[in-house]
Amino acid sequence: MFTGLIREIATVKSYKNNILTIQSKHKAKLGDSIAINGVCLTVINVHSDGFDLELADETRSIIDESKLSGQVHMEPAMMMSDRFEGHIVQGHVDCVGTVAQITPRENATDFIIKVDKKYIAHIIPKGSITIDGISLTVNDVGDDNFRLTIIPHTLKETLMKNYKIGTKLNIETDVFARYIDHILAHRSSNKSMSWDDVDKIQMSY
């Protein structure tokens, strides 16, 4: 589990044969879970200046692989002793969105992000969303887009300052919205769900 608070701007050294090599100050261990631009990956090798991560075919089929180059957001998995901030992030990317509009304001910047309409049900006004691994708050939701208002500190400390119209984004919607929608969609009108049913749904994520 992650919080959506970026711990470091790391650098991609290489990405080939499904292996992502990251240069980072973070001292990872074999088997650690680390989110790179919002994607939960497993450390398979450790170097003096970073680590290697492996991407499964399923992951590659969902994310935008162009995000696996240059500088990237990095967050190690949350430890039980950590202070909980941000929101609950699984590192399971749901879809790729696109920056449709950027509007500077007096003390913030509005971003309009376009997504496939089928994901809008899981994006909640004033709820949480993860954009390239960053925990953010949704302001408004449209038919196929949503609006974020980003404060100067977030722009300064993340790669959002480099986003332009057309930039692709890894998006993870709210985990609770996904759970509720899945439960309601699969609930029989003649039968209440058992706890075994709920457990199976949770395990599917």
Image (tube, rainbow, N blue to C red):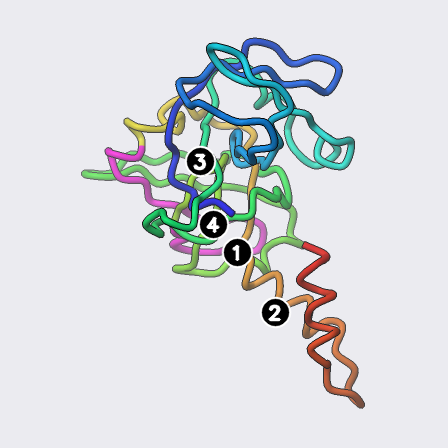
User: Mark 3 = which residue?
Assistant: 101
Q: Which of marks 1 and 2 is nearer the N terminus?
A: 1
Instruction: Identify residue type, mark 1.
Output: Asp
Q: Which of marks 3 and 2 is nearer the N terminus?
A: 3
Whole-percent x, y for residue 205 in the image: 67, 54
Q: Are marks 1 and 4 in contact (CB under 8 Å)?
A: yes
Q: Distance between the residues labelled 1 and 4?
A: 6 Å
Q: Is 103 displayed left or right of 127 in the figure?
A: left
Q: Name the residue under label 4.
A: 129
Secondary structure at numbered mark 1 = loop
Label 4, residues with CA under 10 Å away: few <14, some 14-19, many ≥20? many
Which numbered disc, 1 or 3, marks the residue closer to the eye?
1
Q: Nearer the viewer, residue 197 or 107?
A: 197
Foreground pick, 170 / 168: 170
Q: Which amino acid does label 3 sit on?
A: Gln
Q: Which amino acid does label 4 sit on?
A: Ile
Report the span colored magenta. Answer: 137-154
Q: Mark 1 or 4 closer to N-term?
A: 4
Above or below, 107 against 123 in this view is above
Identity of the residue furthest to the left in this view: 106
Task: Name the quadrant containing residue 161.
Answer: top left
Magenta stretch contains residue 29: no
Question: Badge 2: how crowded within 10 Å, few (<14), some, or many (20+)?
Answer: few
- Residue that mark 1 sits on: 174
The percent coordinates of residue 180 (x first, y second) are: 61, 69
Q: Which of 2 and 155 is in front in this view?
A: 2
Mark 1–mark 3 Cα distance, whole angstroms, equals: 22 Å
Left-right relation of 163 to 199: left
Q: In this view, does 191 lie to the left or right of 150?
A: right
Tell me if residue 105 comes above or below residue 190 in the rendering: above
> What secondary structure is found at the residue carrying circle 4?
strand
